[in-house]
Image (tube, rainbow, N blue to C red):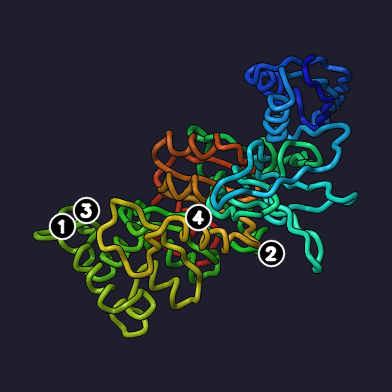
Amino acid sequence: MRASETVEITGHLMDGGILSRILDDIRDYGGDYVIEQFDVGHEAYDSSSARITVQAEDDDSLQRLLMRLQTRGVNQVVPGRAVTVAAEQDGVFPDGFYSTTNLPTRVHIDGAWFDVENPEMDCGLAIDVSDLGTRAFTVPMSDVAAGMQVVIGASGVQVIAPRADEPGDAFGVGAADVSMERPQAVLVRQVADGMRMARADGKRLLWVAGPGVVHTGAAPAMVELIRAGFVDVLFAGNALATHDIESALYGTGMGIDLTMGQGVEHGHEHHVRALNTMRKAGSISAAVDSGLLKGGIMHALVTHQKTFVLVGSVSDDGPLPDVYTDVLEGQRAMRAEVKDVGFCVMVATKLHAVATGNILPASVPLVCVDINPAVVTKVADRGWSHARGIVTDVGLFLEQLALELIPGYRRG
């Protein structure tokens, strides 16, 4: 006998293509379906709703299918109660663990519903019951501890699909696309408006940046955005900080004169000398305090008391003393800084952009800017419902964004 469950979903099922994706998911997982009820909205911004009975070969297959469908905002009509199992060893989930989405999620435990504290995709769902109350929270695989109570299966778990935003919301549901042949001035203005709204709501502005910001000559624009209060947190790797510091100390980026756009004699060694200077100082902050470092992005972050998290990779020279060389510790440091983030801008980076998108709730609007369409497409396709991709030169983008956000700004 095949296992079955009745599920439901509400949203823009037709014009957004969601229903088609749901049915494809069911088939991809070897299941079958019967559409029991389908109500189509009449107006452009009316929601549609569907009730579907899904079938799978056995209960394990059904649970995996239900978890997959929840990434689309599909929930069980009768959710039941969550089932938990204690993890048997550190760093390993129990078999059949619930794989989380980054959508707002709640869990049914002991007759009550509890909101998941930190929605994040591709994690497990842990439950902690103590004298202080019941907590539900996502936990990455690396942080699982033996004895931790982890939810298995999809029973008792509900996700909340993104709402259908009002017309004209640049970063509303369905904005996850890649813009290549659209007026850039309009796109930049939409990004600026989103940042202003987030700041007006008391939310933090998160930036994720790669060394291309320095190489394209956009560091001065980035510095002005920091000074104007449009950067609260920066996530980056060793390369951005190193090339920025090299530029501040020697006027070059990877040995290229940033004012003339050509190589200088012995310029290839400048980044290593910049690294050595920072390592001797002990930290970037110490170099700023002592007067060694007098300009650039990292100098502006330190002097304006903004947060930065630098996470390294196997290709790093040095690295800088502020760089996390343990990537798991780096991930934890990044997770600690995403609270209260209301807008995210990703420029000239792929790996850090994907890593950041993975730990952000789906409700956070984000924009990814890169000259390489493949990078932008990779980020826009990760399932973030409030994402916008812009294919353009990051230097031009940052200059235009500074013009939009900072009264009296002049191009550097």
- Residue position marked by numbered label 1 in the rendering: 268
- Residue position marked by numbered label 2 in the rendering: 200
- Residue position marked by numbered label 4 in the rendering: 401
Q: Residue at x 83, y 47 (%)?
A: 108
Image position, residue 36 (x, y; %): 87, 17
Q: Residue at x 60, y 44 (%)?
A: 93
Q: Is residue 114 left or right of residue 225?
A: right
Q: Residue at x 49, y 34 (%)?
A: 377
In the rendered structure, find residue 261 and report the number of the disc placed on it.
3
Q: Regarding mark 1 in the picture, which secondary structure is present there?
A: helix
Q: Are marks 3 and 2 in contact (CB under 8 Å)?
A: no
Q: Is residue 191 left or right of residue 130?
A: left
Who comes first in sequence, dot 4 or dot 2? 2
Image position, residue 188 (x, y; %): 54, 48
Q: Quadrant of the C terminus?
A: bottom left
Question: Which three-letter amino acid code belongs to the residue tagged 3?
Answer: Gly
Question: Which three-letter amino acid code belongs to the residue tagged 2?
Answer: Ala
Q: Are marks 3 and 4 in contact (CB under 8 Å)?
A: no
